[in-house]
Image (tube, rainbow, N blue to C red):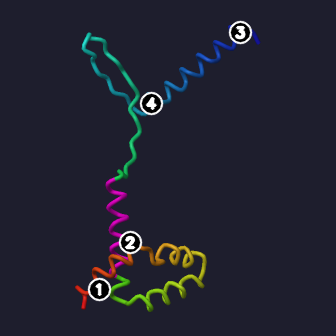
Amino acid sequence: MTVQHKEFHGRVARLQTKHAAFSRGYTARVQSDGLIIVEPRRLRSRVSGRVFLLILTGFLIFKAFLMAAVGFASYDERVNKLASGAMIEKLGAVLMQADPVSTWGAHKIGPILR
């Protein structure tokens, strides 16, 4: 292949990529010198970091509440029973096992529940 042919295919590939990006939408803005710049719209995640952090915090508070309500020995026994089950139950046992944050929270919530 000649050099010109390779350059042509490179330009076509760049244009196809640009076209695909613009097909998802675009925004236009005017610079201070009056030049209009059109850019493809960026894809944003529907779940922000703040929402993810809120869900994680809620889950840890839920675990702490369960530990405080049931008791630490009973909670560990139930998690071990869950670990001997099917594959999805093993995954649940991994998620529900005691961690330092939940244990600390359970020690703080415990006196309030009693």
> In the shown orientation, is residue 81 left or right of residue 75?
right
- Residue 27, image x and y in percent? 33, 27
Of residues 104 and 66, the one drawn nearer to the viewer in this rendering: 104
Q: Are marks 3 and 2 in contact (CB under 8 Å)?
A: no
Of residues 100 and 29, the one drawn nearer to the viewer in this rendering: 100
Question: Where is mark 2, residue-wise?
Answer: 101
Q: What is the quadrant of residue 26 in the picture?
A: top left
Callout 2 secondary element: helix
Q: Are marks 2 and 4 in contact (CB under 8 Å)?
A: no
How many dots with numbers? 4
Question: Where is mark 4, residue-wise?
Answer: 23
Residue in the picture at 40% in, 46% down: 45
At label 2, which amino acid type do we have?
Val
- Residue 101, image x and y in percent? 38, 72
For marks 3 and 2, give the CA distance: 62 Å
Q: Mark 3 vs mark 1: which is more N-terminal?
A: 3
Residue 21: within the magenta?
no
At label 1, which amino acid type do we have?
Gly
Callout 1 secondary element: helix
At label 4, which amino acid type do we have?
Ser
Q: Mark 3 vs mark 4: which is more N-terminal?
A: 3
Q: Nearer the viewer, mark 3 or mark 1?
A: 1
Q: Are marks 3 and 1 in contact (CB under 8 Å)?
A: no
Q: Which mark is residue 110?
A: 1
Callout 3 secondary element: helix
- Residue 109, image x and y in percent? 28, 81
Residue in the picture at 35% in, 64% down: 55
Quadrant (top left, top right, bottom left, bottom right) of the C terminus: bottom left
Q: Which residues are magenta?
A: 50-65
